Image (tube, grey):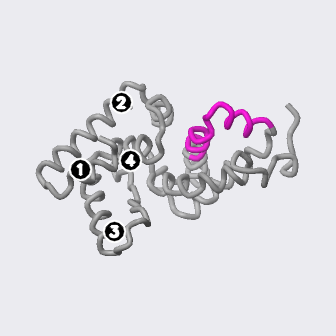
Amino acid sequence: MPSASVSDIPVNDGPDSLSGLYNRYANALYNYGAGLGFPKDTCMDAIHDVFCKLTRDEGRIRRLVAEGHEKFYLFCSLKNRLIDISRRQGKTSPLENYTAGFAIEVSVEESFSDEEERSRLKAKVEQLMSELSPGQKEAVYLRYMQEMSYEEIARLLNITPESARKNVFRAVNKMRLAAKKNPGLIAILLLFQI
């Protein structure tokens, strides 16, 4: 397949263009990379590398969007690129030291007008998430915050779809138990559509 130049890719042609995909997913990709434990600069470099790679194949963007796999492709490509960068720098990948955990930056909707209420809600979500193992946090993040299917989660985490389901199920159960111990947390479970 002939290589495409950057000018051949629809840059400002709507939500399915390269810039549309970047605008839609860059923040989520950054949060995911940071959650895996990579530094800010490394995350941003890797995100830009992923999008630069997309410019080399003129049909890839259209195929990914048409098949509905653009989000999975971007997350998977980012994770692989972050690992490559870490290896090239001769550093141990944060993924190899996964016991540190998957850190989710909880963001609370701006629709809450009261800053104090927003802070309380954020603290409650963080308290629930602290009950989970790193793998469970990542699975919950991908399932409920990024709305990925169990099959996509399985491929991204290199596990079976059944393991992905069990991981999410066990995480939800842990959060339910924590919420039962602290009634103030029950409403938070609604955020996870449980």
Query: Could you say which disc has been placed on residue 98 in the image?
Result: 4
User: Which residue is drawn at the image coordinates 59% and 52% (left, top)?
Assistant: 25
* Precedes in sequence: disc 1 or disc 4: 4
User: What is the x, y in percent for residue 115?
Assistant: 35, 75
Marks 1/2: CA–CA distance: 18 Å
Q: Quadrant of the N terminus?
A: top right
Question: Is residue 68 magenta-colored?
Answer: yes
Could you say which is closer to the camera, residue 123 or residue 14? 14
Amino acid type at circle 2 is Arg
Q: Which residues are magenta?
A: 59-78
* Precedes in sequence: disc 3 or disc 2: 3
User: What is the x, y in percent for residue 187?
Assistant: 24, 53
Marks 1/4: CA–CA distance: 16 Å
Marks 3/4: CA–CA distance: 30 Å
Q: So how many labels did they put on this image?
A: 4
- Disc 2 element: helix
Judging by the rendered image, the residue that carries numbered circle 2 is 165
Residues at marks 3 and 4 touching, judged by CB atoms closer than 8 Å = no
* Precedes in sequence: disc 4 or disc 2: 4
User: What is the x, y in percent for residue 82?
Assistant: 57, 50
- Disc 1 element: loop
Residues at marks 4 and 2 touching, judged by CB atoms closer than 8 Å = no
Relative vertical location of residue 44 with respect to residue 160 in this rendering, above or below? below
Query: Could you say which disc has been placed on residue 118 in the image?
Result: 3
Judging by the rendered image, the residue that carries numbered circle 1 is 131
Amino acid type at circle 4 is Tyr
* Precedes in sequence: disc 1 or disc 3: 3
Marks 3/2: CA–CA distance: 30 Å
